[in-house]
Amino acid sequence: MLYDETPLGNTRLIETGQTRGFYAQGALVAVLTAQPLDRFLDYKAPEGGVMQGAYVEVPLGPRKVLGVVWGAGEGKFDPAKIRKISNVLDVAPMREEMQIFLQKVADYTLTPMTAMLRLATRAPGLTNPPSMQRVVALGSGQPDRMTPAREKVLAVLEEQEGQHFMPSELAQMAGVTPSVIKGLVKQGVIVELETPRDVPYPKLDPSLPSKTLTPSQASAATQLQAHLQTGAYQTTLLKGVTGSGKTEVYLEAVAECLRQGRQALVLLPEIALTVEFLDRFETRFGRRPAEWHSGVTMTERRRCWRMVGQGDAQVVVGARSSLYLPFQNLGLIIVDEEHDTSYKQEDGVFYSARDMAVMRASICGASVVLASATPSLETWVNAKAGKYTRIDLEKRFGAAELPDMCAIDLREDALETGRWISSTLVSQVNARLELGEQSLLFLNRRGYAPLTVCRACGEQVGCDHCDARMVEHRFHAHLMCHQCGETKPIPEKCPSCGVEGRMAAVGPGVERLAEEAADRFPDARISVLSSDMSLSARALKSRIAEIANGEADIIIGTQLVAKGHNFPLLTCVGVIDCDLGLQGGDLRAAERTFQLIRQVAGRAGRAEKKGVAYLQTHQPEHPVIKAIIAGEEDEFWQAEAASREQAGVPPYGRMAGIVITGPELSVVSNVAQHLVRTSIGLRQIGAEVYGPAPAPIARVRGKHRIRLLVKAPKGVMLQPALAAWRAGIRLPNNVRMNIDIDPQSFY
């Protein structure tokens, strides 16, 4: 198979009966570059020829840019004007299955192929040849004097223990000038080393003993291994209650994949989970895997990309973008916590890593394991329909039992003014303190307070660049916009009426909850876990280890604490505001609330002592709250599925979100109105167009945002109609149009 057509928006696979092509010197080849162009470019094959899929450098104007030989050139231009490929990179060519995968993702998400190639080549220095490189690492010397800049450098080196950095990278990460690095090198505080640019990762040993598995774990592991042994595509939902040992089960699937000589990819939803997982992985296989996420140095990212491509990285543990690494023999993809919303990319290329993992595995004949205690409705429906195999782990590992669930009706146990912890929950936490056990107070809201209001005039402090209210972060002494990151000092007087002393924080965040906990439980050791606490991966690992070792009595946390952590002494969980996630019109609100509360409650009682979760709510009769309390999981999913099916929305219908953005509201509105007037092609296939309407957050970073929503029956081929619709309008230069297939959020 080759890709034949030149216009990228209409590229399609065609059957040619040819094997993967080799192009002799001077032959015309089509090269896909990562530049924002709308077509393939013709070049002449260099001396010695070139393989299809080869990564190359080609001249484009005065520059040389990275590209991939996609197939035969069209030859519609004057041969005398066609330039020659400058350089063939010394890396493994892109496999045909990867070309197919990128094209399928592009077609599904309506993304230009050039953007897909950028996603697949996000490693620095790919055009540099294999060679030695000069890097720096932490030495044994001490600085003659300590300065703030030197402290920053040493903090980065200590945080990234054992890592090597390019000098410029270390300076950038520490926020200092290169001269600071040079000065520390002279004093021996930092040492310079000559190392190979890229070396293979140490071999993993699948024969090392695993943890002793329970009969249900062993049965699940055997089923996963049997799927792998067929060598055929298979997707399995590994559904296990919190604490049932899903990780140990799927690590046995990784071991089987290694025994077959194939590569494995483990996707994790949060970098914060990586450190803890890597320790467990090293215990099982003797060595650490390759890593791919934003916390890895540029040197390591380049090494990972190249070693994956030549088969010298057996397992990669990474974030969603690791799905686009150039695996040579991918046999297994694990999507841990497959329900997690962080698997949806909502910037640049809009895609769901969970769904694209299934797509990639189906192309290369790999197995997929979707692991979760609370699977997404889409996965639940696919398993129920028989598209996915389902394996259940219904009991916790060892003697641990699932926690009891209790609702605290805040209409009866009313909160005191300025307080957020009910008297019932206070008494339960006090009881745990007396027993030497831990309690978790969960509130999925960062900062100190979500709103700062003037009591004199009612002004709510908002962001200057977004239609969003600024969140007070008292630990950092500023207000922050959670849309664009803009910060302001906490005002002493109203920015609108100028009255002093009347500014008030309204509502609770985790910082305010921690303040109340310190007041109510003065002798307790309190630890706060939140994604905005500026904790590095190493510091977070240390904080979690301290909590697990009993060095905290009360944990205050956001959804960060709901993801995979094991605190043996934790027996009481208090969800401060169960109703928070049920607000708004998001079609997935009930599903996400159910998942989050179940995951948080699952932190309790993971050792010998049984746990209890208390849910503070003003509406204990709400179907979601009732389902959580009663443990009626399948009943909840069936009711939620019936509701979605009746409404004709995913997974029983097709949806696309369209957002038009631009600096001038009138121009953005005109574009949106024109799109609606020209949407007859969508209506002809049975789709409905809703809007235009201002987005819930109608201005972000100074850009106005107007939304449209397209809904269609499940069997409709929506993407071709959307592509034709989009092609029918020429956008003004300063206006952007984003199409999100299967949107997960509607902000």
Image (tube, rainbow, N blue to C red):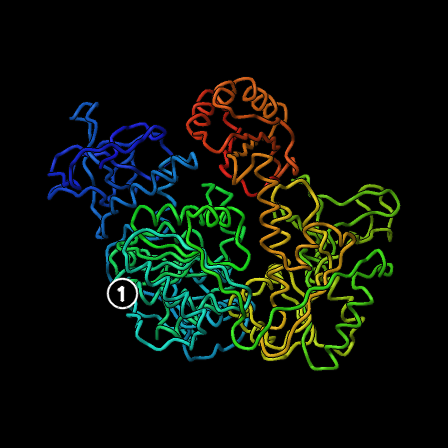
Figure check: 590 above or below 564: above
Which residue ends up furthest to the right in the rendered image? 456
Q: Residues within 10 Å of mark 1 (few under 14, many from 20)?
A: some
Task: State the SS at label 1.
Answer: loop
Q: In screen coordinates, is 729 left or right of 101?
A: right
Figure check: 585 above or below 191: above
Residue 121 in view here: yes
Residue denoted by label 1: 200
Q: Which kind of residue does numbered mark 1 sit on?
A: Pro
Q: Residue at x 14, y 41 (%)?
A: 22
Residue 362: x %, y % from top left: 33, 47
The residue nearer to you, when weighing 128 against 216, is 216
**Count of labels shown?**
1
The residue nearer to you, when weighing 736 against 649, is 649
Residue 173: x %, y % from top left: 48, 60
The residue nearer to you, when weighing 706 against 410, is 410
Residue 294 in view here: no
- Which image quarter holds the C terminus? top right
Residue 732: x %, y % from top left: 51, 24
Q: Residue at x 25, y 63 (%)?
A: 261
Q: In screen coordinates, is 576 left or right of 184?
A: right
Residue 734: x %, y % from top left: 53, 29
Q: In screen coordinates, is 256 left or right of 595?
A: left
Figure check: 548 above or below 370: below
